[in-house]
Amino acid sequence: MTSKGNFCRKIGLIHENLSCLINNVLNFIIHFFKHVNPVYSSNYSNGISNEIPQNSDKKKTGSVKKLDDSIEKSQNNLNEVNDSKQGNAEKPQKARKYITLPGGKRKWIRILPPKVRGKDKKPRKKGKEHGNWKHGLGKTREYDSEKYAAWKEAVLRNCNFRCLVTGKTDKLNCHHLNSWDWYEEGRYDAANGVAITVDIHKEFHAKYGSGQNTFEEFEHFLFENYNMTLNDRQYGNHEPRFTTESVSQDLQRKQQEKQADLIELINSRNHELVSGIYKKSSSVIVIRCKIHDVIHETTATNYKKSKTGMSCCGRQRQSQATAYYNTLR
Ligand SMILES: [Zn+2]
Ligand SMILES: [Zn+2]
């Protein structure tokens, strides 16, 4: 037993000596390298790694530099934020605003930047330079007059609501053969007008100009471009011819009939017509309710379309209906 213990002690001593020797040798090497290359010294002394290639070290230093830069930047940003809080930097304009409406309600509204208009635009063309120049007679054209509407209607009826050249029924224009500006006696003469499509009308005036046009010009245009004359109307010509007077009488009669029908309807609803003439669907009429003594402004079409014509009578009708259904329960 003792011999065995002695042997063990001997081996331990040898081991201790060996480890001391190795440590000494290593220390010597470390010291040597410290003097030769100071970069490696720290790594060797720590004993983390024995092999460190130069490239990885370079990379590390680069990344450290980057980190430093980013920290500096963030610090700068922080400084800026502090500045803006103190009010040194310019504040960006708010896109919304919280307002108080009359009545106490509050709401967010959008704030739009002020529009700069007409800065880059060309100046508006006026007078002779304008595309729709009517040779100084623009204000005498009376486009909306009843006579003009009657002339237009008469021309269209004479042409059977078809284009003289193509026979199309949509996008029709009424063209004055002897133009409006010089031929005053024929301004409302149905025989002085023809129905043609917009494209052909534009083509004619592009070639022969607008204003100072004559009957002969249009004949020439038809013969040159479509090989036809004004007399051979392939889509028919209404006989007997309508005149502006006859058409205007006809239109007046129709309007009077409409008005009579409307008054009949108003009377049947126990209402009264205060003012307004029923010419077209958008014409405004003023009506008084005899039952509730309320005055209401509406259009003729809306009055005809609704069941009672006025809101006061409508409410009464509704309440009567609900009262009736309540009795059934
Ligand atoms: Zn024309
Ligand atoms: Zn009423």
Image: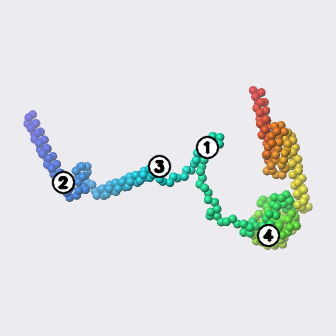
Residue under label 1, please give it: 100
Q: Residues within 10 Å of mark 1 (few under 14, many from 20)?
A: few
- Neighbour class for label 4 at 10 Å: few (<14), some, many (≥20)? some
Task: From this view, report whether residue 282 is shown above or below residue 11.
Answer: below
C-alpha separation, residue under disc 3 versus residue under disc 1: 27 Å
Instruction: Write down the residue under mark 3.
Output: 85
The residue most toward the left is: 3
Taking the spot 82% from the left edge, 39% from the top edge, the residue there is 293
Q: Which residue is mark 2?
A: 31
Q: Earlier in the sequence, mark 4 or mark 1?
A: 1
The mark closer to the camera, 3 or 4, is 3
Is 14 on the left or on the right of 205, as rendered? Answer: left
Quadrant in the rendering for residue 142: bottom right
In primary-sequence order, the first of circles 3 and 2 is 2
Give the amino acid type for the residue marked by disc 2 in the picture. His
Instruction: Residue 41: give x, y in percent of width and height.
Output: 23, 54
Q: Provide the residue designation for mark 4.
A: 211
Tag 3: amino acid: Lys
Q: Are marks 4 and 1 in contact (CB under 8 Å)?
A: no
- Please name the amino acid that badge 1 sits on: Thr
